Amino acid sequence: MLRAVRLALVLTVSLAPLRAGAAGAPSGLAAALEAFVRAHATERVSRVELPSLGDLEADADGRRVTFSLSEGQPVVGAVPVGVSIWNGDTLEQKSVVTAQVSVSRPVVVARRQLASGSVIGAEDVAVEDRAVTSAQVDALSDPAQAVSHQLRRGVQRGEPLRAVMLTAASTVRRGDRVKLRLEHGALVIETAGRAEEEGAEGQWIRVRNLGSMREVLGRVGPDGVVHVEL
């Protein structure tokens, strides 16, 4: 608890009494709060949106104001900022204002429209600098994170790709003839089988031994071989 309080104090910035800004520009409290958010961002901020400050703006006029962030708070998406209004050394008011912060970062986007179930190739994606909002904070930044993965849903051209949109591409599909491998110590037995369901590397699937016609469970290997246990 003490560590969290100390960090909040370190992140607190004291400002001179606030005054209205020029017409069309953020004024007073809003301008100061936006400046605080931008100063504490670790990425390039493209936009800061603030709610209507209403009475809080009026209460801060002519007062000393300090801002603070919680320990470990990332400055992207919805960012709660503590606002304290002081009269000399007396704390008159304490509030939390949530700023919506968009940052500019490289993200992986689809180069063309892709259907659900598509396996992504290197030619299907590109990296572009985009303004990232709270809904896209998990957008991928490296094409390698997307290539050879399968889409859970269709995406539009230019749409940022997120981890939740992807799944491991199926190495084996239902009905495929596969090699079944049983390993027990030094004993290795291989035989022909048929996949009864699709599966990606590392997944357990039902397969049928074509010699005995018995259905067993096996784990899909990187080469498509299904490893069966006793």
Image (cartoon, grey):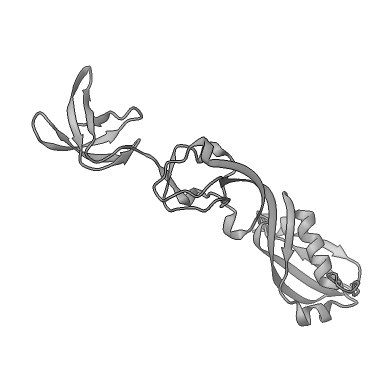
Q: Is residue 119 left or right of residue 229?
A: right
Determine whether 64 is above or below 5 in the image.
Answer: below
Foreground pick, 19 / 196? 196
Q: Locate residue 167: give its quadrant.
A: top left
* Number of numbered markers: 0
- For residue 10, say whether it is visible: no
Q: Give the residue at the far top of this rendering.
A: 186
Asked if residue 118 lies left or right of residue 187, the reply is right
Residue 180 lies, in percent from the top left, at 21, 28
Residue lying farthest front?
112
> Considering only vertical position in the picture, is 101 above or below 207?
below
Q: Is residue 217 above or below residue 163?
A: above
Q: Farthest left residue?
A: 212
The answer to whether residue 169 is visible is yes
Residue 104 x, y percent position in the rendering: 70, 51
In the image, residue 200 lies at what x, y percent? 34, 39
Q: Quadrant of the C terminus?
A: top left
- Residue drawn at x 46%, y 41% is 120
- What residue is rendered at 28% in x and 28% in y? 225
- Left or right: residue 152 compared with residue 215: right
Residue 184, by quadrant, is top left
Q: In this orientation, which residue lies closer to the viewer: 70 or 195?
A: 195
Q: In the rendered view of the protein, which quadrant contains the N terminus?
A: bottom right
Q: Residue placed at 19% from the left, 22% from the top?
A: 190
